[in-house]
């Protein structure tokens, strides 16, 4: 069958989807809205637009041209937001560097991405200096400093950010170019081996922004985002574009607050003083906030927070709801730009009791518009959406990375049979909600049966003494693997709770028929701290390495 394609008139304008268009609307609708950095700096969108032009012009003076790669090492800041726009808008590629990488991982990503210019926060100068001798492509280093001073260092700077901007006129004509031009790149963490680079085009980031807007803003649910919200990310801007939310909230013209280094007291101070209503973070950050002594004296009603990166446990969800925090799940990964699902509560569920709503809030969620999800067996065949049959979660959407940087074999594995393979196992129920039951690599196989580490974590988190928990499988001669739980207790319980208390609590769920008896962890480690990855996720590979 031959499809009938549109033939445009020669004078028609073929409108490319470019990041620069996301900035047009807020400069018309909200030129006087604020963008805030910590408790020390603020300006309006009109000034932001001028500084984006200044930054592009300044980078051009430093020799940056289309196709070059500009890397950033900074805390969440107004400067980072300016880079989110100016760098890709001039046709260069923005590399958001993970500031928590080891020196060997850091220099690998810098060289692998072929960075030409690096903008580095003063706090990370010693780290960058430690790998300077191994630079392969870096030509210039620009200092980012709150104080505006250049420190004494062997690292050579071409200038300080604010000083260079002040010497540059806010004049830059951002060009049109192919919407499939690479806009950003960054590297995955928490995997074995070297970090893997992903990349996204202008078209993908624009479509992700509109997909996020549809999922977050369009549906009658327990939470809805709009231009009236005050946004503060608590997910690093180096991590999947802070989940793409700075692009969305800029498009909406909302007030934005960037907290710099994540410090519990500063975060809570900004939430209250700037009247923050929307954030997103990983469970460990939310746990850090709800266990801060300051939270008991604050009114956090109306604060909407999306949890991602790891599963949201019912225990943490209930604790946050108790403080008035409107907490629910979002799901995605580095390879997916990242948004795939949101745990929006459907209208007919809004009158349910808290216990039933917590169940929905802690599900992985419903696919946002333009996302296709399936669960498949080992041969790639789709499985029933009955809430019981588990398979690997695969996805299609217009914003998924099309491969890994310079890694053809791994790219083909990622996209086997035309679906992006997440490496997560889950079920989809009759209402369309996805629920991740485990990572493929984290499922515990004991005596020929499968146990979900996430389900065990969710159960243990509901014990009133438990602050944080991680469950992994450890080698067992008889059963192959047995579950081990590493538990962090709340203050005041350290000398009152034993391994047996936690196991007895798990047994109550055996009696309810929720888990089999072999699912009760045979070993409980009451530890002071659970190891984390560079982006704040629980590092199960480190736990396995220690106890296997």
Image (cartoon, rainbow, N blue to C red):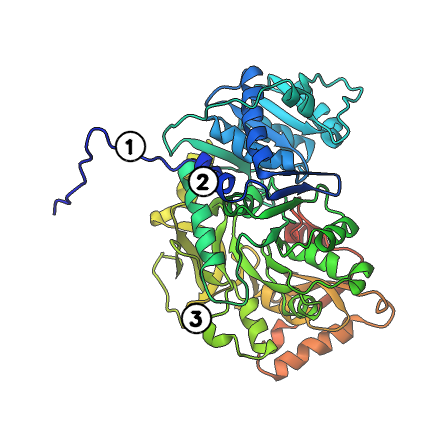
Side of 498 where 241 appears, left or right = left
The local crowd at label 3, few if under 14, some if 14 to 19, many if 20 or more residues have their Cα within 10 Å, is some
**Which type of secondary structure does the marked residue at label 1 adopt?**
loop
Q: Earlier in the sequence, mark 1 or mark 3?
A: 1
Residue visible at 60% across and 58% down in the picture: 307
Name the spot of residue 118 as percent of width and height, x first: 62, 25
The answer to whether one can see residue 333 in this image is yes
Q: Pick whichever, 238 or 464, lies toward us.
A: 238
Kindly identify the residue that appears in the image at 42 percent across and 71 percent down. Answer: 431
The residue under label 2 is: 410
**Residue under circle 1?**
13
Q: Work out whether mark 1 precedes mark 2 in sequence or the reverse, and give the earlier one.
A: 1
Query: Are there few (<14), some (14-19), or many (20+) residues within 10 Å of tag 1?
Result: few
Q: Which mark is residue 429?
A: 3
Any part of residue 446 in sight: no
Give how far across and how far down residue 38 sits, in percent. 72, 42
Q: Quadrant of residue 361?
A: bottom right
Percent across and percent down for residue 315 are: 67, 69
Q: Going 68% across and 68% down the picture, which residue do you hit?
A: 461
Any mark on residue 542, and which? none
Q: Neighbour class for label 2 at 10 Å: few (<14), some, many (≥20)?
A: some
Q: Position of residue 215 (x, y in %)?
A: 46, 57
Q: CA distance from mark 1 to mark 2?
A: 38 Å
């Amino acid at each position: 069958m031959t499809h009938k394609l549109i033939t445009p008139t020669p004078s028609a304008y073929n409108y490319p989807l470019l990041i620069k268009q996301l900035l047009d609307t807020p400069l018309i609708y909200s030129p006087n809205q604020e963008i805030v950095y910590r408790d020390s700096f603020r300006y309006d969108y009109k000034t932001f637009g001028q500084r984006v032009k200044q930054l592009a012009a300044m980078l051009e003076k430093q020799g940056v041209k289309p196709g070059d790669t500009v890397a950033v090492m900074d805390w969440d800041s107004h400067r980072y937001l300016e880079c989110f726009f100016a760098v890709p808008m001039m046709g260069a590629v923005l590399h958001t560097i993970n500031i928590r990488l080891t020196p060997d991982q850091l220099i690998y990503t810098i060289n692998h991405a072929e960075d030409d210019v690096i903008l580095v926060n003063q706090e990370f100068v010693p780290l960058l200096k430690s790998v300077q001798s191994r630079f392969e492509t870096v030509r210039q280093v620009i200092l980012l400093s709150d104080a505006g001073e250049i420190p004494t260092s062997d690292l050579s700077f071409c200038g300080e950010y604010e000083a260079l901007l002040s010497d540059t006129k806010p004049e830059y004509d951002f060009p049109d170019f192919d919407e499939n031009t690479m806009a950003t790149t960054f590297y995955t963490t928490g995997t074995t081996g070297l970090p893997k680079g992903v990349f996204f085009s202008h078209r993908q980031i624009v479509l992700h922004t509109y997909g996020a807007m549809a999922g977050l803003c369009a549906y009658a649910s327990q939470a809805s985002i709009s231009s009236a919200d005050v946004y503060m990310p608590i997910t690093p801007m180096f991590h999947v574009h802070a989940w793409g939310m700075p692009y969305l909230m800029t498009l909406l013209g909302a007030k934005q607050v960037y907290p710099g280094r994540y410090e519990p007291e500063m975060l809570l101070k900004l939430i209250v003083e700037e009247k923050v209503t929307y954030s997103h973070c990983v469970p460990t950050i939310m746990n850090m906030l709800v266990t801060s002594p300051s939270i008991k004296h604050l009114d956090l009603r109306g604060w909407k927070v999306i949890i991602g990166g790891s599963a949201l446990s019912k225990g943490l969800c209930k604790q946050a709801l108790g403080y008035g925090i409107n907490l629910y799940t979002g799901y995605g990964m580095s390879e997916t730009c990242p948004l795939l699902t949101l745990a929006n509560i459907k209208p007919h569920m809004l009158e349910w009791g808290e216990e039933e709503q917590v169940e929905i809030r802690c599900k992985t969620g419903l696919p946002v518009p333009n996302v296709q999800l399936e669960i498949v067996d080992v041969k790639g065949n789709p499985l029933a959406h009955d809430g019981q049959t588990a398979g690997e979660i695969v996805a299609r959407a217009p914003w998924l990375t099309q491969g890994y940087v310079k890694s053809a074999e791994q790219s083909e594995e990622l996209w086997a049979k035309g679906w992006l393979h997440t490496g997560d196992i889950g079920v989809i129920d009759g209402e369309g909600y996805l629920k991740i039951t485990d990572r493929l690599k984290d499922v515990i196989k004991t005596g020929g049966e499968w146990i979900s580490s996430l389900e065990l974590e969710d159960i243990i988190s509901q014990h009133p003494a438990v602050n944080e928990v991680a469950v992994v499988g450890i080698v067992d001669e008889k059963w192959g693997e047995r579950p081990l739980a590493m538990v962090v207790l709340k203050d005041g319980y350290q000398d009152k709770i034993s391994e047996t208390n936690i196991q007895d609590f798990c047994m109550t769920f055996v009696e309810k028929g929720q888990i089999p008896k072999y699912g009760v962890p045979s070993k409980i480690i009451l530890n002071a701290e659970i190891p984390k990855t560079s982006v704040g996720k629980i590092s199960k590979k480190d736990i396995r390495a220690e106890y296997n």
